[in-house]
Amino acid sequence: MRDSIQPSDHPVDALPDVLRGRRADAAAIERHLSGCASCRSELDVLRALAGSAPAPLSDLERERLHGAIESRRAAGDRRPGGGAGGRPGDPAGPHPWLAWTWRAAAGIALVLMSIGVLRVVQEGATPDWDPGLALDGWGREVADLGLDPADVRLALGVGILDDPTLGLPLDEAGADLEGMALPWEEEDR
Amino acid sequence: MLDERSAVEQARRGDERAWRELYERHVDLVFRLAYRVVRDRDAALDVAQDAFVKASLALAGFREESSFRSWIAAIAMNEARSWLRKRDREREISLERTGEPPSGRRSPEERVADADIVARALSFIETLPDQQRDAVLLRAAEGLSYREIAEALGTSEGSARVSYHHGMKKLRKMMSRFAGSGGAPEGVSETR
């Protein structure tokens, strides 16, 4: 036998099959073996390996093993092939699509929360923002004039109610206000 | 009795009888392969159990490009290797804790000193690279064809053949070196 890799038709390739009585040309290979020390030593190794098989499983071992496998399968997924990872060794999840749904939902929720937080932070960072006024551009202008937005709101509200040129009908609340002294007028009296 | 392809197909659809048939057909192969790697009967039974559970759960993803036999053999070998790695890790932890050398970490030469020819061959096999060891076990010990070995190892037939021959060549060298080291029998066949 050569030291290099053997071609497929070399007798050494057939030795494992000869050992198992699977070769029709076993007699020819035996003749080769009688003149080839290298092949004989390979056959010795093969015999040793073939002889390394454990004692066969007893019926009891076989049944116990089957029982253990079935109970583990029942704990994971009853149906063969169900919940498969796809490749040997993949962890088997019970319902992969369910896991993905949860992940997707969690991801969307996280994105929405982040957007909300960012908006709040952005708006909160605006120095003249006043949620009570809620007039966006107006708020900024009022702040630029150095006025208190709360005062402006009050003045505007009363002015609208009192101004007949706007053509707004005075409702009951407006009528009650008419002629009423405002806080600072009260102080002047 | 179902043919292999039908058994796989029916088992995949949830037929428990077909699954049982696949189990009965291949449990001996799986157990023997596991035993030859882990060299402990109870551990081999555990490995066989893990292999069948994984095969059952992954059956939907089994592509019939390979035979079920070589597929389950590959799973068994992977599980056996995982078992060995786990054992080695535990022994390392045990060594760190106690400071005692674990019995399983002797050199191949030390380990075979008190072993018979079969145990010696298996000890030497442990020292081979994974692919060579798997190819040798599948071909020499189980008689799988190169095509089946290639399927099990996820490689080409030519590569499986090369791995097998490289592994066998190393094994023969180790065996003959041991035989020539004195005290050991000259030819392994003479001890049988």
Image (cartoon, rainbow, N blue to C red):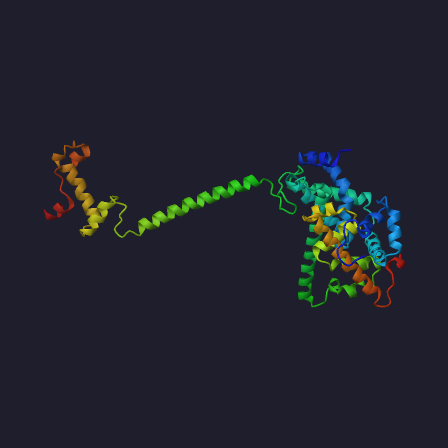
**Looking at the picture, how far across and down is residue B42, in whole percent?**
76, 51
Q: Furthest residue to the left?
A: A189
Q: How many marks?
A: 0
Q: Quadrant of residue B174?
A: bottom right
**Looking at the picture, how far across and down is residue B162, in whole percent?**
72, 53
Viewer-proximal residue, B31 or A151?
Answer: B31
Asked if residue B113 shows in the view, the reply is no
Viewer-proximal residue, B96 or B130?
Answer: B130
B167 is higher (above) or lower (below) than B148? below
Viewer-proximal residue, B136 or B160?
Answer: B160
What quarter of the picture does the C terminus of chain B occupy? Answer: bottom right
What quarter of the picture does the N terminus of chain B occupy? Answer: top right
**Looking at the picture, how far across and down is residue B189, in whole percent?**
88, 57
* In this rendering, position of residue B62 left or right of residue B136: left
Asked if residue A5 shows in the view, the reply is yes
* In this rendering, position of residue B50 left or right of residue A161: right
Q: Quadrant of residue A24?
A: top right
**Looking at the picture, how far across and down is residue B58, in whole percent?**
65, 42
Q: Quadrant of residue B129?
A: bottom right
Identify the residue at horizontal 49%, vertical 42% (top origin): A104
